[in-house]
Image (tube, helix red, strand yellow):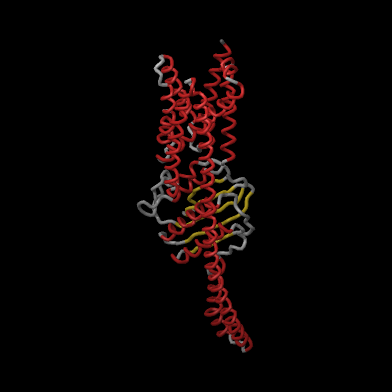
Amino acid sequence: MFLNTLFSILTIFIIILSFLKIDQKLNKYSKQLILGSGVVAVFVITAVLDYFDLNIDYLMLCLWPLFLYLYYYFICDFQRQIAILYSFVIYLAVESTDTFLSVITSSVFGDSFINQYYDFYFFTIRIISLFLIFKIISIFEVDLLYFKERIFKKFVQQLIGVYLIITLTLNTSHWLSNIAHFNSFGSMIATICFLIFLGTLVQMKTVRDRYEKKMELKQKKFEQRQMEQYMDKIQDLYAELKGFRHDFGNIITSLNLAIEERDLEDIKRIKRDVLEECYGELQKEEYTGFDLGNIRDSALRSILSRGWIYAEKLGVKLTFETGEVIEKLPMRLLDLVRTVGILVNNAIEAANSSVEKEVHIAVFNMPNGVHLIVQNSIADQPIDWNKLFDKGFSTKGDRRGMGLGIVKDIVEGYSSVFLETELINGKFTQTLVVGEKGN
């Protein structure tokens, strides 16, 4: 009796732990204490209903996704569709895996063995199912927040529809399993539900991989266009320098004649009106401020070159600094492009509203990873640091502040990527640190 009670308590503990651990694995905004308290509350309600023999236990199983939805929508502040998606995935990860293992093992060992060691059996099944679902999540690289973009809206709606059907069908199979003549049929339905659930995880990975390949191809085309523009600009600068070389020859000849004739006034005139003007021309940022030769990451190079061209178009002085080779950064292509693109574009647009109109970008290697520093002049107005990363907030006008909120979400998805925001000597400075291991 004591062992049966002990294993029952341990089984409940493992179920609670399963919800907490899977939530922690998939949800970077996890609130473990609140989720754990809610899971316990649902168990208590279910136990009370079971004690009074109200025969709605299986209805309570259907309410699990509702509880999880409330947790993700109100506590974790997810979008409505993503909250529903999370609630179904985590519930089915726990319940369908456990049911599938129970069906398989009961067919192997037989009902008499299970009835004899009932509590120990279900405790063991719960432990195995926890390790199994963790392995499945790892194999299929499940990342539900990836699908919060608008482009996946229809796909997410289809997933939710499938998960709703699986949930209802799975709980129907539990009811059928208690009827002697339908026991095998209920077990077969439970197995099919688990396999369909696995199929949806495969489909999520397939859709994600397909979308990333499509975006990579699009990014490659973008990089090619940016490089063409960059090379056109370089060729224009080369033509200017070639013309300057010819002019410089004439300057030297004139200066040489003035020196031979000891015409001090002519020498001063050439220095003042010609040489100093030429020196000023050679110091333009077009010649000295933007050398991308050391950037080996093509995506980063294309974004920076686009920023350079964009800044020139707006009349913003953009300078670039790096003294060493920068290898490919350990971030997903789309995440890197969006993050750096937002930081650079925001800096250029903010600088354009300032008096100085200056942006400085530096990239260099440090022991803890690559540091990308984007610094820009700003207009003379206070910055609300508390709202800076809120979605919808902007210092550039109404409804234009989605950028830094997106950057924050992307950065929080990586364990070795950090963003520091400071105001240094009147310059708005953002430092993106990309560590060695990335995600």
Instruction: Answer with left or right where residue 4 lies relative to residue 163.
Output: right
The answer to whether residue 409 is visible is yes
Instruction: Answer with left or right where residue 211 lies relative to residue 255.
Output: left
Above or below residue 68? Residue 312 is: below
Above or below residue 110? Residue 401 is: below
Residue closer to the observer: 230 or 121: 121
Q: Quadrant of residue 56?
A: top left
Residue 71 is situated, as x and y percent measured from the top left of the image, at: 43, 32
At 58% from the left and 26% from the top, the residue drawn is: 127
Residue 142 is situated, as x and y percent measured from the top left of the image, at: 54, 40
Looking at the image, the residue that sits furthest to the left is 398
Residue closer to the observer: 2 or 398: 2
Q: Quadrant of the C terminus?
A: top right
Residue closer to the observer: 190 or 231: 190
Residue closer to the observer: 51 or 270: 51
Looking at the image, the residue that sits furthest to the front is 181
Above or below residue 117? Residue 328 is: below
Looking at the image, the residue that sits furthest to the top is 1
Residue 69 is situated, as x and y percent measured from the top left of the image, at: 42, 33
Q: In which quarter of the image is residue 239?
A: bottom right
The answer to whether residue 285 is visible is no
